[in-house]
Image (cartoon, rainbow, N blue to C red):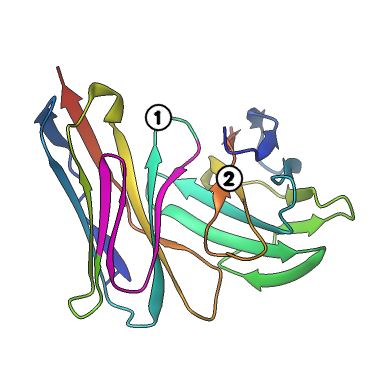
C-alpha cells in the first residue's frame, strides 16, 4: 500500500463548477500538507501549503486537512478551463523535508 | 515562474553514457532538492542539499550523485545510464524558515536511447 493515495481521474467538469480533489494517507507522522498544480511537461507549481489540521483559503482555492481521518482535500471554486492540469498532493513528516507525493489527479474543465 | 532554474531542458543520450543536470535555487534559498518523475513511479525524492552539505537521501541509485557548490547551485550526475532512467528530473528549493514549502524548477527531460 502506498503512503499517499490519490485518484488519478481524469475528472471532467464544466466551467464554473466546484471541484473537489482528495488524498488519503497512512503515515500519522505527516504534519505538512501541500497541493501542487502541474501542467503538461512543466514543473509542479505550489498552490497551497498547510500545517496540521484545519482549513486554508487562497482566492478560489481552499485546502482542508483532517488528520483524524488522514484525509486532505482541495476545493476549486468557479473552475476555469485554465485550471485544466494535474493536481498533486504532497506531504511530509515533522522531522524531514522529504515530500511524499500522490500520483496526481488529472482535471479537465470544459467551456 | 518559481525562480528555480534548470538546464538543459532536454537531454537525449545513449545507454551507458553520463550526463550532468544543473539547478540554480531561488535567491536566498539554501536548500536544494532533486526529484525524479516517471510515468510508473510518479514524483520520487532523490536527494537534498543544504548550504553545500548533503542532508537527506531518498531512493537514489548508486549510479547517481549530486553536489551543491559554494554559490548554492547544484548538479545531479547520472552515470551508466539505462533505458529506465528516462524521466523528468526536477530540482526544488525552499526558504530557510519553511523547508517543506518547496518550489520546483521547470525540469530536465532525459531520454535514454
| A103 with respect to B2 (left or right) | left
Q: Is residue B67 magenta?
A: no
Q: Name the foreground residue: B8 vs A56.
A: A56
Main secondary structure found in the magenta portion: strand
> Label 1, label 2: how many angstroms apart (C-alpha)?
14 Å
Q: Identify the residue position indicated by label 1 in the image.
A: A40
Q: Which chain is indicated by disc 2?
A: B
Please report the residue visible at 82 percent of the width from the left and 63 percent of the height from the top. B52
Q: Identify the residue at horizontal 64%, vertical 63% (top origin).
A: B47
Image quarter (top left, top right, bottom left or bottom right) of the N terminus of chain B: top right
Look at the numbered disc 2 and give the secondary structure of its residue: strand
Range of magenta residues = A43-64
| Tag 1 and tag 2 share a subunit | no
Residue A14 in view, yes or no: yes
Residue B104, numbered label: none
A56 within the magenta span: yes
Contact check, label 1 and label 2, Cβ < 8 Å: no
User: Please, which residue is most extreme toward the right here?
Assistant: B70
Query: Which residue is located at x 48 percent, y 47 percent?
Result: B37
Percent position (x, y) of residue B23?
A: 72, 43
Secondary structure under the numbered disc 1 in the rendered image: loop
Q: Which residue is mark 2?
A: B90
**Residue A19 x, y percent position in the rendering:** 15, 41
- Provide residue B102's location: percent of width, then percent of height: 55, 54
Of B34 and A82, the residue lying toward us: A82
- The C terminus of chain B lies in which quarter of the figure? top right
State the image quarter where residue B95 is shown.
bottom right
Q: Residue at x 80, y 58 (%)?
A: B67
**In the figure, is residue A39 to the left or right of A61?**
right
Q: In the rendered picture of this protein, how many numbered marks are placed on residues?
A: 2
Amino acid at each position: 500500500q502506498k503512503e499517499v493515495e490519490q485518484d488519478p481521474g481524469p475528472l471532467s467538469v464544466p466551467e464554473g463548477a466546484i471541484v473537489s480533489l482528495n488524498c488519503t494517507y497512512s503515515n500519522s507522522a505527516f504534519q505538512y500538507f501541500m497541493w501542487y498544480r502541474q501542467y503538461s511537461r512543466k514543473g509542479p507549481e505550489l498552490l497551497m501549503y498547510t500545517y496540521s489540521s484545519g482549513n486554508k483559503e487562497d482566492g478560489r482555492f481552499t485546502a482542508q486537512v483532517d488528520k483524524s481521518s488522514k484525509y486532505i482535500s482541495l476545493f476549486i471554486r468557479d473552475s476555469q478551463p485554465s485550471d485544466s492540469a494535474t493536481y498533486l498532493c504532497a506531504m511530509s513528516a515533522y522531522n524531514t523535508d522529504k515530500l511524499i507525493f500522490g500520483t496526481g489527479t488529472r482535471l479537465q474543465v470544459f467551456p | 515562474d518559481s525562480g528555480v532554474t534548470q538546464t538543459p531542458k532536454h537531454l537525449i543520450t545513449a545507454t551507458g553514457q553520463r550526463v550532468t543536470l544543473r539547478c540554480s535555487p531561488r535567491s536566498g534559498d539554501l536548500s536544494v532538492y532533486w526529484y525524479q518523475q516517471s510515468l510508473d513511479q510518479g514524483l520520487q525524492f532523490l536527494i537534498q542539499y543544504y548550504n553545500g552539505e548533503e542532508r537527506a537521501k531518498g531512493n537514489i541509485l548508486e549510479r547517481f550523485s549530486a553536489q551543491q557548490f559554494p554559490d548554492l547551485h547544484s548538479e545531479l550526475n547520472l552515470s551508466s545510464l539505462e533505458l529506465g532512467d528516462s524521466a523528468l528530473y526536477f530540482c526544488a528549493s525552499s526558504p530557510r524558515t519553511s523547508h517543506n514549502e518547496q518550489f520546483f524548477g521547470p525540469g530536465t527531460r532525459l531520454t535514454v536511447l
